Image (cartoon, rainbow, N blue to C red):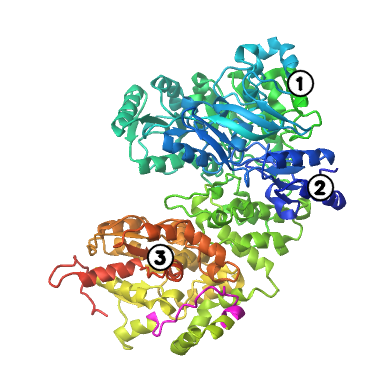
Amino acid sequence: MASGNTPNPRESGALAAALRAAVRGDVDLGPTARALTTMDASNYRRVPLGTVAPRDADDIAAALAVCREHGVPVVPRGGGTSIAGQATGTGVVLDLTRHLRTITALDPEARTAVVRPGVVLDDLRAAAAPYGLTFGPDPSTHSRCTLGGMIGNNSCGAHSVAWGTTADNVHALTVARYGGGTLRLEPGAEGPPGVRELVDGHLAALRTRFPELPRRISGYALDALLPEHGRDPVRAFCGSEGTLGVVTEAVVRLVDAPAVRALAVLGYADETAAAEAAPGLLPHHPLTVEGMAADLVPDPAGLPRGGAWLFAETGGATPAEARAHAERLVRAAAPDTVDAAVVTDPAGQRALWRIREDAAGTATRMPDGSEAWPGWEDTAVPPARLGGYLREFRALLAAHGLRGAPYGHFGDGCIHVRIDFDLLTAPGVARFRAFSEDLADLVVAHGGSLSGEHGDGQARAELLPKMYGDELVALFARFKDLWDPDGGMNPGILARPARLDDNLRFAVLPREPVDVAFGYPHDGGDFSAAVRRCVGVAKCRTEQATGPSVMCPSFRATGEEAHSTRGRARLLHEMLAGDAGGVITDGWRSTEVRDALDLCLSCKGCRSDCPVGVDMATYKAEFLHHHYRGRLRPAAHYALGGLPRWLRLAAPFAGPLNALARIRPLAALAKRLAGIAPERDIPPLARETFTRWLNRKWGKGTFILSNDQVAWFWPDTFTEHLAPEVGRAAVRVVEEATGRRVMTAARGMCCGLTYVSTGRLDRARAVMRRTLDRMERTVGDPMVVLEPSCAATLRTDLPELLPDDPRAAALAATVHTLAEYLEKHAPDWEPPRLDRPVTGQTHCHQHAVLGDAADRRLRERMGLTGEPEGGCCGLAGNFGFERGHWDISVACAEDRLLPALRAAPPDAEILADGISCRTQLHQLAGVRAKHLAELLAEGLEETPAGEPEGPTRGPRPPRP
């Protein structure tokens, strides 16, 4: 069967029918499934025929048999470890992540676990934790990488100086073969017929041509089959990158997990000094020795002084023991360091580790915003030679006119780097090849390995003769043939590899910028460049979000790749590729992209949580703008997208409309016509709008005050018509704290949020321009915006939709949350002390765009203990109100918000600044959450008479 980019429909149909007849799992040869698996986290793209998600080992064997019968290759795919192209292919992709996620046994006494290949590493670690155990290897993608993928690539991670590679921690494997049959691999067991004879016939080459270093991942580990190494087929199979067979079960070793950890952060003058110092720390038995230089850390806040740093983690049975171990490391390193710190606070350690773990994404952008790519992500040399290697590596970059920021596992001599290759033009690709050949020579000259962690894939396998010589590389091909005589397992990888400059994923993208509505200032105005941001790091596939993180609520609700940020980016990439890509060919009219984006909540979490800053909310708005241009839209786009207009028209009739909304048949009809979920209640309209109340408070004859006497409020639609009590409370607080009179900037203004979220971008720009025209007098003055989603729209969407209007950027720069405004304009004001716990949710747009540092400081001064949850409430503006979204909306709320509410103490204040979050809590849990302004105002009212409420600035205006 043809295995190119455009399968024969008849043959594809026959294959699909045969797979569905043989496999109980999921079979999908449609364009969405193909588009989602064209790429891994590498520079490469190969279009598969489709995907199979097997349910068990029998399904794997059946799928392999069908594919062999039809002459179709197979690519086993785990998740989170492949950045060299080995998880892409032209045949059938076996998705081992969906169903094969069972930990079938865990024996604390034997310190072993039996796992299926789709088990996520963090799930295994969580299962082992109650016994004081863990799995030692831990790539930075530990929250989403699978054990099958780790075995395929022989993954390592930060703790390999203590616990080794995956191959060091696997006891036995059960492997299904493409040609049929299953093998049980364990030390001393026989592999396929002929392997022992192959090894015994080439003992001299196998004993002399493999370099000795901790991170030799390149090629096949045939030296593990030597008699003196115990003829270990497990170690030989680990790192085979899906080219030999498919792991159906693994017995892995577990290690003792330190009860407490500390982190010694060592600052050095420069990268070379840090690299040369790293081997000297190993005799002190740290758990990690990780390194990075200042060019990877633009903001070194929290780090000791230095131009480069080593992170050396220690463990102990008690906090004192862990700290003492870290302090010994600091003393041992002292002659070479310029500064050092010991961090014992778990939150502080997590914050520092996040810098390191996000580096695979953050390194994809140079300081000037230009793109950088993998390809030479993980070379390794003997640790003692790392300093010299890095000096020559930097010189080689400069000689080729390239830039990169090395970082990585300095204790093991393994370096990660993203390099600003130009992979869009022929001269740039030629430079990529020339540099790759020169770097391979440099690595070999230092006795190193082309791959020290993530495998060779297509990125480096072509260059393996430089490292091993022609004789050993020929043995690799023969070894592959003994395992896979039909050549069906992941062809083009490791043995007889494709060229390193073939199949580049950028080749199919348009060369000219696409006509778009947003400005994409961080991507040079190029939508293709914005979509290229996604390099497949897959942090969006994390299933258990912690702390303030938000991304990606729809993936956590569905578990489907199409509803992850990465999946949607892949679909957009294929949409842009069009006919050249051969998968999604109907451009902006694509139903596949539309359906995937339909469950995007536009929470903007990826804008901050994605290490490369993918902004799917903006991409969704852009897509909807083009998809529905000149066509009838869903009813909700008109009803909810035009909400500011409808609420202004309805305001005089709030009472009667509220009464009608309580008549169930009428409400049901209205919701049906408006495209609103029938499960939703229609929120009541305020009988008196916020601005009408404010005008009544001051009277119609209010004189004009100077700007230093006025606090300007943005009259957002939601505070104005649905929650004026929030506005009234904020007025009370701001006037008390600053002595300024609150005024609204102008009537009828709108940030355009609802038009943006529904993709009505022409209308959004018209509304924004009209708003700027109306508020000429106040542009440049600080503006308090009480609704976080509106504040985020003004901060980002406004200047990005009107990049040529300087007033847009000027207004965006004036936007303040209430806490930011109080901190800046009433720094000496003492807020009321409430001294009680708090729960609730930080609005996702505030987390992603605005930040909540000022809110945290204000809550601390108010005596509010605990933290609002991260994540997304699931209502997310229009999303949770739209018909068909109810189940996902509830699932998102059940992810973090509702469990936090149930776990909160009875006296906890429920805090939610966003009207979506407050509405979701009211409709799903029957509770009334409060805006921070309301808590402050209530605190002021509770202050006993005669007790000072803190200094104010200027005379107090009358209380409302």
Q: Quadrant of residue 777 in the image?
A: bottom left
- Amino acid under disc 2: Ala
Looking at the image, which residue is at 77% across and 50% down?
A: 20
User: Residue 489 at x, y = what percent?
Assistant: 75, 34
Q: Name the secondary structure under disc 1.
A: loop
Q: Quadrant of the N terminus?
A: top right
Q: Quadrant of residue 943 in the image?
A: bottom left
Q: Name the secondary structure under disc 2.
A: helix
Residue, disc 1: 193
Whether residue 504 is visible here, answered yes or no, is no
Mark-to-mark CA distance, 1 and 2: 30 Å
Q: Nearer the viewer, residue 413 or 347?
A: 347
Q: Nearer the viewer, mark 3 or mark 1?
A: 1
The crowd level at tag 2 (other Cα within 10 Å; few <14, some 14-19, many 20+) is: some
User: Residue 577 at x, y = what percent?
Assistant: 73, 53
- Amino acid under disc 3: Thr
Whether the residues at callouts 3 and 1 have beta carbons within 8 Å, the answer is no
Residue 136 higher or lower than 357, as above or below: above
Looking at the image, which residue is at 45% across and 41% down?
A: 355
